[in-house]
Every structure is written in C-alpha cells, then in structure tokens.
Amino acid sequence: MLAPAVLLVFVALAAALGPRLLLGAAWVQRAPGWGILAWQALTISVVAAIALVGLTLAAPLTPLAEFIARLCRTTPAEVIEHYQTPAGTWVAYLAALAAAGLAIRMLWLTTSTVVNAARGRHTQLTLLRVLGTEHPDGFVIVKHPKPLVYCLPGLRKRVVVTSAALEVLDPHELELVLAHERSHLRSRHDLALALADVLRRALGPVAVFRVAHEQVSTLIEMQADDAAHDRHGLARALVTLGSGLAAGVPESGLGAGNVAAVARVERLAAAAGPWKPWKRRQSLAVALGTAILLATPVALAMSPIVEMIITGCTTILG
C-alpha cells in the first residue's frame, strides 16, 4: 500500500535534487563518460519510478495479481492485500492505463527516432557519394562555404570535412578534430544522445529530462575532446571552427564545434586534465552510485513482495 507513495517521493526527490547535485559536481566534467552514465541513470530511474507507480497501483487487478502471485509462489489474495490502496479499483484501472500509455509513447518515440535517424543518414550518405571526395586519411571532403567537421554514425559511418574547414585548419588541428569525430563513432555517442532525446520528448514537462538532454549533449563532446593528445591544439581548432555551426551540421550527424564550444575551450585550456584510469576509487564510487540509483525504484516497488516472502517464511518457521 505504501509502495506507490514512496515511489512518488523518490520521483520528486530525484527530479529535484539529482540535477542540482550533478550540475554542482566537478567530477562530471573531469570524467564526462561517467557523467553521461550518471545523467542516464538519473533519468532512467525517474522514468522507471513513474512507470512503477502505475504498476504498483494496478497490482491489485486480477490479471496482474495472478501474475505476481505465480512469480512469488503465493496467492492472488495476498498480493491484493499487500498492494491494495484505499482509493479503490478505479484508481488501479487508471494507473494501468497510464502505465500502458507511457510504455506505448516511449516505444513510439524510440521507433520514430531510430527510423528518422536512419533516413537522415541514408540521405546524407547518398549526397556524399555524389558530392563528396574520399581522402586517403579516411574522411570525405565536400565543397561548402562553412568550416564544418562532423561524423555520421551507424553501419556505414563517415567523417565529413568541408573544403572551408581544410582551408582554416592546419594539418595538426585537422588531425585533432578528426580524432574527436572518430571518438564519437567508437563510443556510439549517437545512442546516448538518442536516449536523452527520447526521454526529453516523452516527459518534457519534467525539467530533469530537458536538463539531462542538454548536459548529455555537452558531455559527449567533452568525452570526444579527451581523445585528442594535444588539448590546447584542439582548443585552438574549436575557436577556429567557431561556435555558431549548429545550422550547418545535419541532424543525423555530430559536429566538432557546434555544442557548448565556450565551455569546452575553457575545459581544454585548464591545467587539470581528464580523469586517469588509475583513479579507481572515484570511478568505483560513481559506478556504485549509479547502480544504487537504478536499483532503488525496483526495490521500492518490490518491497510489498519482500514483505510477503518474509511473512510467509516466518509463518512456516513458526
């Protein structure tokens, strides 16, 4: 009976306090890969808790109660007793509809995002075959008046450099920018960005999802920046490319200089570099924290089941 209320408290606390803690934590930008994981864990835990509120409220309904009873090797009557609320059956039906609606919306948005991204990349690849020129160093050159460097992820991944970018970047800067783009492709940052976008579109009124989308967009760029062996050189390249390039990079691509350029240049120019692999304690602490965050909604939703099991064991032993 208390599970839905406790889950709602978790949603409120996580959505309100989570962004403040992560935005104020210096390690998030020092270790952007872990920062991306932390933001993903926060948003997924909030979504899971919202969905589990509906499921725990709907648990007293006969089909769900019978399913839970089979899993827990108990009776539907016990499930109903531990999950029923004073609100009555009509709330359970509304909760079941809301949970189903959220699942359908998430599935629809995920499908549309994947399909639209695939179509966009196919269009770009078709244009590149016609207009682009393959370079021996593994990128495609296209004639364009704006200095752009971006990548197209997917099965037929490509790094694209415009003729204007070749004119303004020296060979060393070009090498650093290419390393940045190839890091995007290796890390599949397009998937992290797609997840953040789906959650933002699905639950946009909840501020945590909008903030998470912005932060993930920035952190994937910072993580790709860390692939460069010359941080100051990459900072110069970003300044050369400029910060107003978002209009030139296609939606299906990830660009080198179009997201949070000022913050990234300041980070690259700072004396402190990214986390090193030997900082195991910090990494372990972040991994443990994200695991606990993801497990908490499930644990709260299952608390009545745990109570049933403990009660049954006590009865048998008694």
Image (tube, rainbow, N blue to C red):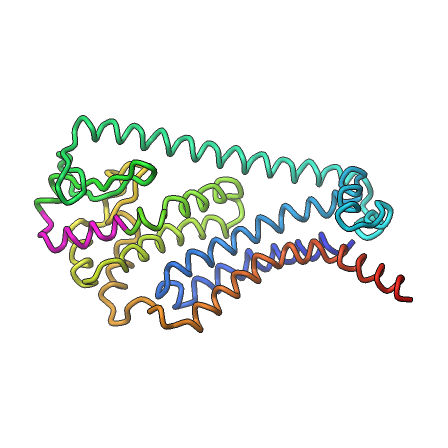
Residue 225 painted magenta: no
Residue 311 pos. (x, y %) = 84, 61
- Quadrant of the image containing the C terminus: bottom right
Q: Is residue 102 left or right of residue 24?
A: right
Taking the spot 52% from the left edge, 66% from the top edge, the residue there is 288
Query: Residue 126's quadrant in the figure?
Result: top left
Q: Bounds of the magenta span?
A: 168-182
Instruction: Look at the picture and state if 230 lies above or below 211.
Output: below
Q: Nearer the viewer, residue 23 or 115?
A: 115
Q: How many marks?
A: 0
Taking the spot 37% from the left edge, 44% from the top edge, the residue there is 190
Instruction: Look at the picture and state if 124 lies above or below 281.
Output: above
Q: Nearer the viewer, residue 288 or 144?
A: 288
Residue 179 painted magenta: yes
Instruction: Look at the picture and state if 299 lies above or below 77.
Output: below
Q: Nearer the viewer, residue 200 or 64?
A: 64
Taking the spot 18% from the left edge, 63% from the top edge, the residue there is 232
Residue 309 pos. (x, y %) = 80, 58
Residue 20 pos. (x, y %) = 48, 62
Q: Is the magenta region chiefly helix, strand or loop? A: helix
In the rendered image, the residue lying farthest to the right is 318
Q: Is residue 175 left or right of residue 277?
A: left
